[in-house]
Image (cartoon, rainbow, N blue to C red):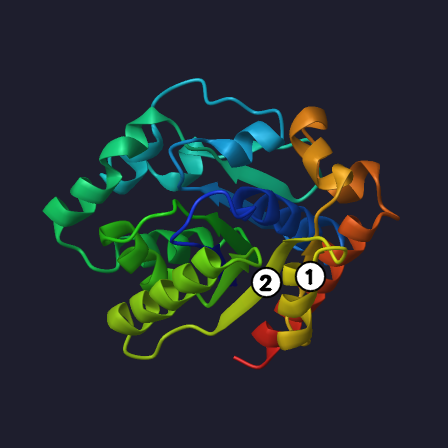
Amino acid sequence: MAVIAVYSAKGGVGKTTIAANLAWCAATISCRKTLLWDLDVAGGAGFLFGIEPDSKQARAVFARDMKPGQAVVKTGYDRLHLLPADDSLRELDSLFGRIGKRKQLAKLTQALSKKYERIVLDCPPALGHISAQVMRAADLVIVPLPPSPLSARAFELVVREIKTHAKVHPPILPVLSMIDMRRNLHKGAREANPNWPVIPLSSAVEQCAVRHQPVGAFAPNSPAARGFGQLWTAIERKLTKL
């Protein structure tokens, strides 16, 4: 089992879209039993699969009022399940602070490992108790980086956060997201980081939220689908080296 966290200290970087598409790749391309765990109160991961939570129970999993498996729902894809977010996660950071268990999330993912081979965490864009829990639970951290000075600064914050909360910190895989090679800034970012995976800016990616489907399900031959597929291959290769 491996826990893959998609994390950024900055919002609007394509984090949720990447998490949802990677979970689909894990289940469909690698044929692994996969759980997409939405930790972001916005609930975007569930929305991208056309799933709305029917109760406010996401927080109860962390408070140990219910087992995590009880909150899991099926998606429309084989081997892919979702643990959705809801409004109750607004209090999650303070809850982690009160319970004082540094590895609560890690223990929960470990319990879920009996059923799932890959767990993809869609993390909220915040620093604090939640990010600390994520860093202790993750085997690999994916950091989406649109080409901008603010994104570069956010990446530095993420690196600092990871090193702060984990003695042996998980590997970090930066991903250039929303890349448009017609723009000089984007082209320069790509040339400066030729080995980083790339997710292009495209209408197919934008259509995920409209169709409530991952790109590979409706546009399998698109550059975006190839980008997600190549990113997933890079992730699997990194996991084999851990």
- Identified by mark 2, the residue type is Val
The image's mark for residue 175 is 2
The one of 197 and 81 positioned closer to us in this rendering: 197
Give residue 193's position: percent from left, percent from top.
62, 74
- What is the distance, in whole Å, between disc 2 and disc 1 at their CAs? 18 Å
Residue 31 can be seen, yes or no:
no
Label placed on residue 195: none
Residue 92 is left or right of residue 230, and the answer is left
Badge 2, how many Cα within 10 Å: few under 14, some, many 20+?
Answer: some
Spot occupied by residue 6 in the image (x, y as percentages of width and height): 49, 54
Residue at the far front in the pictured view? 184
Q: Residue 210 sits in which quadrant?
A: top right
Q: Secondary structure at mark 2?
A: strand
Expressed as whole percent of the image width and height from the top left, the position of residue 230 reads 74, 63
Label 2 or label 1, whichever lies nearer to me, is 1
Q: In the rendered image, which residue does mark 1 sit on?
A: 184
